[in-house]
Amino acid sequence: MKNRIIPCMDIDNRKVVKGKKFLDVQDVADPLTLAKKYVADGADELVFYDISASTKNREIFLDLIEEIAQEVTIPFIVGGGIRTIDDVEKILAVGGDKVSINSAALLNPELIREAAEKFGSERIMLSMDVKRTGPGKWSVFSKGGMEETGLDAIEWAMTGEQLGAGELVINSIDEDGVKDGYDIQLNKAMAEAVSIPIIASGGAGKPEHFVEVLTEGKASAALAASVFHFDEIHIGELKTYLDEQKQVAGNES
């Protein structure tokens, strides 16, 4: 399976927003316009992440998801505010291809198993927000990165795989929006602990960062937001660069 490049649209109040380390959130763009642009630019998949549905305890924007799903020809991942099997069903019914479950899985891990059994593992992703707590140690945080759960991130990843998640999204809170590069050690440790694909998130600042996390970091996919939103990196050019790096690596080996 080829490495995937996945832009992520964080949605609040029906707008795409972006923050740093989960704080200082600002409006960026209209989701539908941006989604179409990313498809045209050559994104492999697209994430719609409703960042305030869980914290504000409101319903997911199903109409907006449906509108985008009709325009998007690549796998469309929806996360944020998913609490029940019913929520998963509604998202898939309006055109979401996969769902990404985070907070609800912490409260009820069986939701992952139930969803995977009902809809197939390939449509269920476990997402986790993690912070480094010591050398080679990371903890899972909840409530938008505000609350430490006490769960070891690597152990939670292994549990997620056992429950039936088909992929893992690893959001590094330490690196979120900082653009210093992905947490290579974290993604590598995750990839070595499980056999399902790892999607790295948090820290993309330049094309080299994508190469690092997809090679040394052993991630199967790299997710990013602000570098794509603000046209600092163009997805088509990034994919060409990644292909060139692979050929260079191939020639050297």
Image (spheres, rainbow, N blue to C red):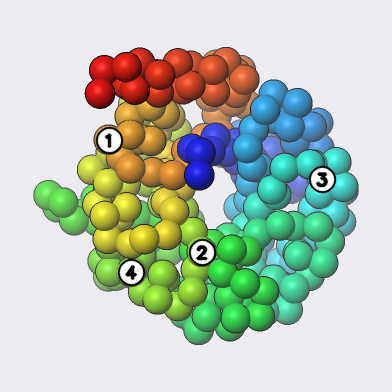
Quarter-of-image position of residue 153 = bottom left
Secondary element type, mark 1: loop
Q: Residue under label 3, please give it.
A: 68
Residue 55 percent location from the top left of the image: 58, 62
Give the answer, above or below, for where 247 lies relative to 186: above
Secondary element type, mark 2: loop
Secondary element type, mark 3: helix
Q: Are marks 4 and 1 in contact (CB under 8 Å)?
A: no
Residue at (73%, 32%) from the top-left corner?
A: 39
Give the answer, above or below, for where 233 lies relative to 156: above
Residue 188 percent location from the top left of the image: 27, 46
Q: How far is disc 4 from disc 3 in space, using C-alphas?
A: 32 Å
Q: How far is disc 4 from disc 2 in space, using C-alphas?
A: 12 Å
Q: Residue under label 2, please give it.
A: 166
Q: Are marks 1 and 2 in contact (CB under 8 Å)?
A: no
Q: Nearer the viewer, mark 3 or mark 1?
A: 1
Tell me: 51 left or right of 40.
left
Query: Is tag 4's residue or tag 1's residue first in the polypeptide sequence?
Result: 4
Q: Amino acid at mark 2?
A: Gly
Q: How far is disc 1 from disc 2 in space, using C-alphas?
A: 22 Å
Q: Residue under label 1, please give it.
A: 216
Quarter-of-image position of residue 239 = top right
Q: Residue under label 4, please give it.
A: 158
Q: How far is disc 3 from disc 1 in space, using C-alphas?
A: 34 Å
Residue 4 percent location from the top left of the image: 53, 38
- Which quarter of the rendered picture does the C terminus lie within? top left
Residue at (55%, 35%) from the top-left corner?
A: 5
Name the mark on residue 25. Answer: none
Tell me: 160 left or right of 217.
right
Residue 194 percent location from the top left of the image: 33, 62
Residue at (79%, 53%) from the top-left corner?
A: 65
Q: Amino acid at mark 3?
A: Ile
